[in-house]
Amino acid sequence: MVELPPQKASVSGKAIVAEHLCKIFNVTKGMLRRNKTEIVAVKDVSFDVDYGELFGLVGPNGAGKTTTIKMLTTMLIPTSGKATVLGFDNEKDVTRIRERIGIVLGGERGLYTRVSAIDNLRYFADLYGVPPSVRDKRVKELLEFMGLWDRARDRVETYSKGMKQRLHLARGLINDPELIFLDEPTIGLDPEIAIETRKMIKELVEKGKTILLTTHYMFEADELCNRVAVIRNGEIVALDTPSGLKKYVMETSVVEVEGFGITEKEVARFRELAGVLSVSADLGENKQVLKIQTPKGSEIISEVQEILRNSRIYDIKIKEPTLEDAYLKLVTD
Amino acid sequence: MNHLRIFLSSAVFSFRAQFDWLNPSMYLTMKFVLSLSQMAFFVFVGLFIRGPEAIPFIAIGNALQSLSWNTVFAVINITGHDKWDGTLPLVLATPASRLPLFIGRAMIHVLDGLLSVAISFFFAAFIFGVNFGQTNALALTVAVVLTSFTMSGFGLLIGGFSFHFRNPLVFANIFTFVLLIFCGINFPVQDLPPQLQVASYIFPLTYGVTAARNAIAGATLIDISPVLGQQLAVGLASMLLGYFLFQAFERSARKTGKMEAV
Amino acid sequence: MPKTLRVIFSAFRMAMLHWMADPQWIIPNIIAPFVFTTVALTLFKDSTGPFGLYAVLGGGMMGMWGNTLYSSGYAIEFEKWQGTLEEVLVAPSKLLHVITGRAVSNALFGLTNMVAILLIAAFGFRVPLGIADPFLFAVSLILTLLSVSALGLIFASAFVLSRSAQALTNGLETPLYIVSGSMFPIALLPFWVHPAAYVLGPTWGVDAIRLATSSEYASQSFWTGMNVNVAIFLDLTVMLLITLAYAAMAAVLFKVVEKRARIKGTLVEA
C-alpha cells in the first residue's frame, strides 16, 4: 500500500532542489560506419521550487525544458549534478519520487487510444498503486472534474484534442500527487479550452499542490507563475518573479500613438527626440499608428502632443513591458 | 491515422520473414534457417506418422514451396508495397506502366528463387538423405525455372486481389503458408477432401512439385512436358486475370478517387 | 491483492481489452501454427495411434509459441507505438510486472489456435478427443502457459536491447516448434538437439499435458515405465525450476532495459 506523506503545511525544505543538472546524450548514427555525436541537452541547471509554488520554466524549443523535467521526474539519469525531489534523491529513491509526483507530458501520445477513458485511468491507477478501495471513486471524481464523465466509456480515439488533454491531466492526478509536472499543458489547444486548463492549474495550486510548468506562452507564465526560470541552450539565464523579469526590460516600454494627419516629417522629429530608441510607423490613409520605444514611458506624452499639435490624436497607449519582451530580450541577445 | 499505423506496424512486425530482404542478415536467415527448419519440421512429422518413406516426398515438396516467396515479392513489386506507409504509390504510376518494371524485377526474383531451391535440395540430399542419383538434370531445371516464373506471375493475380485487403502483405504471407496445404507439398493432393482438391489445381506450384518429383525420379523432359504445359497455362491465365483485375481496380479508383478499397 | 499481482492483472486486463478491440491482430501470429497443424492432421489421417492428440495439443503449443514470440517479443515496442512507453516507465511499478501481464495474456491468446484446431479435428477429421485426467491436464496447461510467458519476457527485453535479437525471431519460430516436441516425440530428433529441447521449460509441460490426456502416450513420454502421476509431477517440477530460472533472467534483463531507458532516453523516439 502506498502511504503518501501528509501535505507539508510549513515550508521545511524545498519541493525541488536542482543542483547543476547536466545531460549529455551520446548518439550513434549510421548502420555501417557508426558516427558518434554528443548532444548537450542540458548544460548546467540549478534552481529550487518551494512547496505550494507554481514555478515556470520557459525557453525556446530545444532549450532543455523537457530534458530538465525528465531528469527531475526520474525519467532520465543526469550525466552530472543531482536533484532532490520532495526530499528524495532522484537517483537513489526513484520509486518514492514516482509514487508522489504526477507528470503530464501531453500531446497526442500517452494514452491508449483503442480503449476507454475509464479503462485508461483504472490502468494507470493500478500502476501507481492506488488502493482498490479508492481507485474507482477517484477515477470517477477526476473524470467528473475534467468534464469527461459522460464520455468516460468511449474510446479515447473518439476524443477531441481538448478532451485528450483533459484526460492527460486526469491521468497526471490519478495518484493524488503533491507535486505535478506539466510540460506545455496548453499547447495546441483552442483558446477556451486553454483558459479552462489554466483555471484548473490555478485551482490545483490553491488546493496546496506544487506545480512545475513549462511553456513558451509568456502570457501564460505571467498569469500563472510565482516565479519563472528562463532556460536557453541548456542553461538558466534568468530566474525571478514575472514582475522582476519585466523590470529587466523596463527601458523598453512602448508608447503607441494613433492619430490622423501624421506624416514622415513628424516621425522624423520623434526619431530625433532624446531618449527615443526607435519609432515604427504605420502611415495608413485614414489612420496612422506610431510605436515609440522609449525608457521615458509616460514622460514622453507632452512631447508627443507638442510634435503632433497640428494633427489629430485619437489615442495614446503606453504598453508596459511584457514578460514576452523580457523573454525575447533574454533569449535573443 | 495513428491507429492504422499501429495496426500496420503490429501486423508487419508479427510477420514471419519481414521484407527487410535488403538487410543481409534477414535475407540469409530466410534463405537458410527458415527453409531448413520448415523442411525439418515436416520431415519429422512425416517420419513420425508415415515412416521414412515419406521423407523424400516431403523434402522435395518443401524445397519447391520456397518458391512461394517469389509470389510475395511479385506482389510487393506490382503493388508498390515496398514502403510500409499504407499508401498506394499508384497515385504516381498506373498499374499498366508498372508491368515492365514488374517483369524486370521478376527476373531477379526468379533467379533468387532458383537459389532457394538449390539450397533446399542441398539440405534434402545431405541432411535428410534424399536420393538424387536418378535425377534428370535438364527436366528438373526446366521444372524449377518454370515454377519460379509462374509463381511470380501468380503474384500478379494475388496483387490484384490484394487491394481489397487492409493489409495486402499479411494476405500474401498467409498465402505462402496456405500453399502448404493445397499444393501436394507434404502429402498428395488426393489426401485432401475432394471439395478442397479443386483448389489445388489453381496454383502453378502444384504442377511444379509433381514435375520436380518425377524429374528427380528419372523422368525426362518429354515425360513431364504435359504437366509443365498445364503449369504454363495456369500461370499465364493467372497473369492475365491479374492484369484485368488491375485494370478494373484502376478504373474504379479513377472514378471514385479512392486508391484503397476498404 | 498484493500490489505486484494487481499490476500484473491490470496489465493482463489491458492486453485483453486491446485484443477485444482488434482480435484480428492475432492472425499473423497463428497462421503458421494453424497451417502446420492442419498439414499434420491431414498426414495423421488414416493412421493408428494417438496422433490426433499430437495434432491438437501440438497445435495449441505452437499457437502459444507463435503469439509469444511475436506479441510478447514486441510487448515493449507496442508501448512505444502507442506512445505510452514513457508514461509506463515513469510509473512506480516495475516494467517487468507490467510486461508479465501482457506476456501471460499473449500465451493465453495463442491457445485460440488450439480451439480452432480442435474444431477442425473433431468435425473435419473426426479425431476422438477425450481427456483422461482433466485436473492434471488443466494444471499442466496453466503451468506450461506460465513457462511460455516467462520466455516471452526474455524475448521482450532482448528485443529492446538488441536489434539483432529482433532479426533472430524470424528464424526462431519453426525451430521452436521442432525442439519443443510439439508435434512429434523428441526421440525422433538427432541426439545433439536433445539438450536444446530439455532446456526449454515448455517441452516438459507438453510431455505432462500429453500424459494427462491419454494413457496411450505413456510409452513415448520422458519417463517411460513410471506411474503416470509421478511422471507428470516430475515433468512439472522440472518445468517449474526452468521457469524460475527464466524469471530470474528476465528480472535482470528488465533492470538493464530500465537503466538504459533512463540513460539514453532513446527507447522513445520523438
Image (tube, coloured by chain):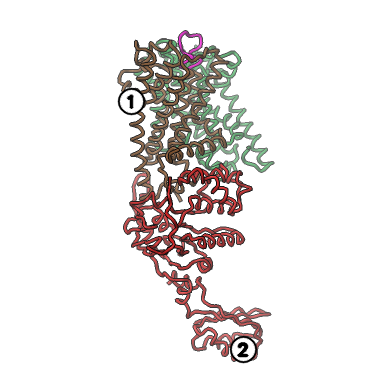
Chain colours: A red, B green, C brown
Give the chain of mark 1: C
Magenta region: which residues?
C40-54
CA gap between label 2 and label 1 equals 95 Å
Classify mark 1: residues with Cα within 10 Å, few (<14), some (14-19) or many (20+).
some
Residue C91 badge: none
x, y percent for residue A49: 41, 64
| Location of residue A314 (image quadrant) | bottom right
At mark 1, the secondary structure is helix
Q: Name which residue lies at 48% across and 50% down.
A: A175
Figure check: A153 above or below B34: below
x, y percent for residue B105: 49, 34
Q: Viewer-nearest of labels 2 and 1?
A: 1
Q: Seen in the image, is C180 located left or right of residue C52?
A: left
Magenta segment's dominant SS is: helix
Amino acid residing under circle 1: Val
Residue sitting nearer the eye, C123 or B100: C123
Residue B28: in magenta span:
no
Whether residue B99 is visible: no
Q: What quarter of the picture does the N terminus of chain B occupy?
A: top right
Amino acid residing under circle 2: Leu
Q: Which residue is mark 2?
A: A308
x, y percent for residue A13: 37, 63
